[in-house]
Image (spheres, rainbow, N blue to C red):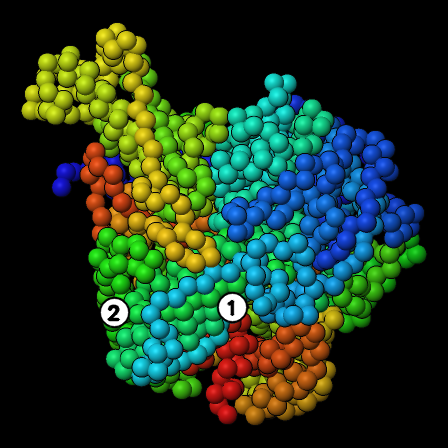
Amino acid sequence: MRIPKFEYFSPSSIEEACSLLSKYKSEAKILAGGTDLFVKMKKKEILPKYVISLKKIKNLNFINWDEKEGLTIGPLVTHNDLVNNTIVREKYDFLAETCFKIGTRQVRNMGTLIGNLCNASPSSDLASPLLVLEAKLRTVSINGERVIPIEEFFVAPFKTALDPQEILVEIQIPKPPPSSSGSYKYIHKASSVGETLVGVAIFLKMDPQNLICEAIRIGLSSVAPTPIRAHMAEKFLIGKKIEEKVIKDSAEIVSSETKPRSRPWYRKEMSKVLFEEAIFSAMEKIK
Amino acid sequence: MEELSFVGKSIPRKDGFEKATGRAIYTVDISLPGMLWGKILRSPYPHAKILNIDTSRAEKLPGVKAIITGKDTLGIKHGFVETPRYPPDQYPLAMDRVRYIGEEIAAVAAIDEYVAEEALTLIKVDYEELPAVFDPEEAMKPDAPEIHPTHPKVKEPYKNIGGKTETFWGDVEKGFAESYLVREDRFEGQLRTHCYMEPQATVASFDYSGKLNVWTSSQGPFIKRAKLATTLGLPFNNVHVHKTYVGGAYGGKVDLFSHEFCASLLSIKTGKPVKIVCTRQEIFEAYRHGQPIIVELKTGVKKDGTLHAQKVKVINNAGAYRGSGVVVIFLCWGFIMLPYRIPNLKYEGYSVYTNNPVRAPQRGHGAPNLRFAVESQMDMIAEELGIDPIEIRLKNARQKGENLPNGDYVRNCGLIECIEKVAQQTLFKEKYGKARLKEGQRFRRGIGIGVSSYFSGSLIYPNSSAAMVKLNDDGTVTLLTGALDIGQGAETILSQIVAEELGVSIEDIRVVAADTETTPVDIGSWISGGAYVSGNAVKMAASDARRQLFEIAAEELEANPEDLVAKNREIYVKDSPGRSISFSQAVSASITKKRGNPIIGKGHYRTMKDVPMHPSLATTKGRWSDNYAFDAQVAEVEVDMKTGQIKLLKATTAHDCGFPINPLLVEGQIDGQVSMAQGHALWEEVLMENGKTLTTSFLDYKIPCAKDMVETYYIDVITEKYEKDKPYRTKEVGEGYVSGMVAAIANAVYDATGVRIKKLPIYPEKILMGLKDKKR
Amino acid sequence: MKKRLIELKINGEYYEIAVEPQRTLLEVLREDLGFTGTKEACGTGECGACTVLIDGKPFLSCLTLAIESQGKEITTIEGLSKGNDLHPLQKAFIQYGAIQCGFCTSGMILNAKSILEENPKPSREEILKGLEGNLCRCTGYNKILEAILAVSEGEK
C-alpha cells in the first residue's frame, strides 16, 4: 500500500513549522512518528497536500522533571522513551506501564505520546492515565501559545480541540502528591494484543491508615466517543472509606457513565470489573 | 524392518537457507524490465446490472497503457469445480452483472500504481441496482432475489441453490424410533479467513514467442495454467506458470483469480510485463474467505452411547458464485461418516448463493465447523447419558478393516489408539468435570476432546502426480516434480524420499519444482495428497533411476543387481565393499554401453488406481480415497469467570498420520493448525453488513500473535511403514488437525464454565451471558 | 513531486538514490535497491513483516519515509549473513523448524536479534511479548521461541 503523494517540509524550528502551518492550514499535517498519519493517508482517510516533519527540530524529545512543576514531555518523545525513563517509572509508574502495553515493540520505537493524543482515538490507552493525572497540553501557533487542560482536548472520535494551525509542543503533568498512586487496567478486543476494548485509569489519594478517599480521578478509554472522566463516580467516592460496598457501588456508577456504541452490554460489565481491579491496585500501592 | 537413513528423520528444510537469508523470491518480489503495474476496479454494489462502462477518460490519463473490461475477454467462464452438473459460473471480468461488493469489472495497466489508481477513478460505470440477499436461509426462501437467473441444473424447492449433496443409508426414522436418546441441535460456524502473509499477487509477461509467462502466489501451478489457458484461449503449452516461493495459502489461493487473468490479458495487450499486488484491505474486502456453514444435527443413540441414527443438514453460504461451496457440502458428509460408525444416516447439504464475495476452502474445508458440531453434541449426549467423553468416543470410533458406506476400505486406522493415548497423557478423566465444582473461583480450568478424520489425497483435476529423477554426470541428482512447497516442506520430504531410495545425501539433490514447462504435472498442494500422492510418484521415479543404475552397475561389477547397495553416490556389492563403482562411473558406463542412456527415472501416481473419477459431489457415490488420517485432540483452557476471557493453555494432538516422513515438519504443521484452531474458536470473525466487509485489516481481524502461543504436545500413532521399492501409504498432516482442536476448545470451555456455545467464535460476553442464563 | 537525492547506509554500505518524499523505506529497499528480503504483508503497521533495524532498534519500514532514513545504520535481513556464514539466529531458525512459508521470517529474525541484544537472557514471556508485533500464520510461534531460546542459551 502506498502513501499518497505530498510535498514535504522539514523545518528547523518550531517557529518555522508554525509559519508553514499558517500558510497551508488544513491542507497540512504535522509528522512526528508517522504511525498514525501514514496509516490514515494510505487508507485515504486524510489526504494532506503538505507534510511538515518535526524531525529536524532540535530538543523536541525532552522528558524533564522539576521538583515543583512535575513532568514535561516533548513532541518527539516515543513510547519507548517513556518506558525506559527512570523518573517516569518512579513517579508515574502506571503511565510507564501503559506505554509498554501500547502497540508493539516496533510501534513503541516510532510512535510518540503527543502523536497518540493528537490522533484522539476513542480507545487510546494513554488518554485515560493522562486524564486522571490532569495533564495540561501546551500548544503554539503564529498567534501565540495556550494551555489546554486534557479534559477539554478530546472533542469527538479522532478530533481534538487543536486549531489546524496549532502544534502541540508539550505535555505538562503535575507532580503527584504524597500518599497517591495511579493504576490502569484494561482488556483487549480479542486475544492479547491490539485495540483496547475497555480501559480504566485511576488516580487515587488516600489515607493509608483509615482508607479514606481524599482525591480520586477516574479515566475511561473506549467506552464513549472520546476518552472521558467518570465525574459522578468520583464525587461519590470523595471522603468515603474505600471498602467493598463503596467499591461495588462506585463501579455501578462508573458503568452508568459509559456510552459504548458496540458490544455495549459487555463493555459496561467490564468497566465495573476493571474499575474494581484498578482501585484495588491503586490502594495496594499506597499502603 | 530395514533402517532408514533419511525418511522418518527430522531433517531441517531444504529451502531454509534461502528463507532465513531473505533470498527466497516470492511473487511480490519479482520485477521485470519495462514492467507495468495493474489495478482492479471493483463493484461498490452487492447486486446490480452493468448498463455501461466508459473508460475513455481513463484511457487519456498520461501513463495509462491499457484498460480491459469484460468485452475485451473471450467471455469464457471458470469455476472451482467444472462438471456437467456444476458448470463454471464466473467470468474473469463481470459482463452484464455484478453479484458482490468487490467483484471485478475492469483492470488498468499503467507506469506505476499511482497512475493506475487514478485511472480507476476516471472509469465511469452506470449501474442499475438490484435487490440483494446476504443470509443463506433468506436466500433459500421463495421470494428471495434470484442471483443466477439462468440457473444450472440443480432443481430444488429452494431458491439460489448453487449445489446440493444428498445421500442416505439405512432407515434414519426407524433408527430414531429405536434410539434411547435423541438430540437435535443447531450449530453455526462463522466466516473466517486465511490471512496468508504474502498478499495475492501476479506478474504476467507475454513474450515475443507467443508464450505467456506467469508468476503467481498459488497452491499449484497446473490448475492455474489450465484455467488461465482456457479463459484466455491459449494452448496449455503456451502458458508457462513459473515457480515462486509462496508466503502461505491455506486454501485461499487455489482456483483462478481475476487479477491473474487481468495481469495476463493486460500483458498480452501491452506487450509488457504487468504486475498486480493486492492490498491487505482488498484481500479482506473482496477475496475468498473460508466457507461458513450451518449444521443442523439430529442424533439418536443407544443407552450405552452407541450411535444409531443421524440426520444432518448443512447449509453453506457460498457467496455470489459457486466457488468451492459444492465441494464443502460433499466433504461435510465425508467428515460425518469417517470417524464414527453410523448405521442409519441421512445427509443433506445445500450450497447457497448470496450476494457476498465468493468463499473458498480454508484449512479443513468444512471439517472444523462440522466436527465442532458433532463433537459438541457428542459431549452433550454423553453428559445426558452419564458416560464420560472418552468412553463414548471409544465406543463409536472406526477401526482398521472397516468398510465405509461409499465403498472405501479403511486399511488401517489408529483412532482408538489416538483417543486412548491422548486421554492418558493429558490425565483427561482426572481433570474432566472438576471445574464446575469450584463455585466462586475466578479462574477455572476445563478440558475437552475433539476427534476428526481427513482424507489423504483424492481424485481431482489434474488427476496425476508425476516426477523425474535425473542423474548428472558427476553423480549428483536432479529431481523434477510439479509439487509446490507452500510452506509445508514439500521439497524437503520429497528429497528425503529420493535420498532414501537412491542412497545419496540430501545435499546431492537439486529440486526443480512447480514449473509447468519443465516439471511434470502434479495435483497441487490443496488436496491433502502431498506426502502420499506426490511422494509415491517421486518414490517410483527414484526407484526407477536406481534400477537403471543397478542394471549397469551389475554388469560393470559382474554381480547380481539384487546384491547391490547404493550409498553416498557409490554402488557396491553387499558384504564386499571393495567391489564398487561411483554413480559417476555408472552414468558414464550407461551412456557408452546403453546407447546413450543418461539414466532418467520416471514415476507417476494417483489415488485409487482403478477408479476413473472423483465420487459424485451430488450423491457421494463412488470411491473417494484409499487413505484416511485420524486424530484425537485435547484442549485445556482457563476461563476468567469475571471477564469471560479464555486462554488456551495446552493442546495435545494424538495423530495417526501413517508415519511421519519428517517429524520436525509434522510438528510444525500441528503447531500451525493448533494456532488456527485457537483463532477460529476464540477470536476470528470476518464481520459483514449487507455485503460490505467491516473487518478490513489485521487490527479488526485478530489472528493469534506470539503472546498467544499455546503449549503443544504431540503423540504419534504409527500405522504404516516405509519400505524401499514398494508404494507406501502415509497420510495427510496439513489440514486435519484444525477441526479436532476447535471442537476440543469448545468442549473444554463447557467443562470449565457449564456454558455451551453453538455459534463460533466464543466471544467472552457469550460466556458471561451464558452464566447469567444459567443462574435463572 | 520533486525527487530528492538521498544517501542511505544499508548493511554497512552507502547507496545514493533519488526518491519522492512519500516513498517509504520499505519500497525503496525492495523496488529500488533490490533488498527484497524485507516484506510487506499489510502496509499499515500491524504485521511486522517489514521490520528492519535502524541503529539497532526494530522499526516498521512501511511507515518510515526513505528521506527520513538518512544518517542512520539500517540493517536488513541481507545484512545478517556473509556469503554462507549465517547469524546464529538464522541457523537456529533453520535447525529448529521455525520457518515454514518464510514470509514473516526476515522481520521475525531481525526483531529477535534486537531483543537478544537488549537482554541476552530473556525469559519466555519477554521474548513472546517482544515478538507480539510480528505475525506468523504458519508456525504457531512454538518453534520460533525454541530457536530464539537456543541462541540465548549460547547456541551458535
Query: Residue at the location (73% across, 35% down)?
Result: B72
Position of B699 compared to B455: left or right?
right
Q: Which mark is residue B294?
A: 1
Q: Return the x and y of residue B104 as percentages of the image width and height.
A: 69, 46
Query: Residue at the location (60% across, 77% down)?
Result: A266
Q: Few, some or many C-alpha atoms within 10 Å of disc 2 (few <14, some 14-19, many ≥20)?
A: some
Residue B581, by quadrant, is top left
Position of B73 compared to C86: left or right?
right
Query: Residue at the location (68% across, 25% down)?
Result: B272
Q: Which SS class for mark 1?
A: strand
Kind of residue sitting beneath label 1? Ile
The reply to the same-chain question for discs 1 and 2 is: yes
Residue C43 seen by the camera:
no
In whole angstroms, how far apart are the C-alphas of marks 1 and 2?
Answer: 27 Å
Q: Few, some or many C-alpha atoms within 10 Å of disc 1 (few <14, some 14-19, many ≥20)?
A: many
Q: Which SS class for mark 2?
A: helix
Q: Quarter of the image containing the C terminus of chain C? A: top left
Q: Which mark is residue B394?
A: 2
Residue B638, by quadrant, is bottom left
Q: Nearer the viewer, mark 1 or mark 2?
A: 1
Nearest the viewer among B412 and A7 is B412
Kind of residue sitting beneath label 2? Leu
Q: Quarter of the image containing the N terminus of chain C? A: top right
Q: Return the x and y of residue A145 as percentages of the image width and height.
A: 87, 59
Nearest the viewer among B378 and A152 is B378
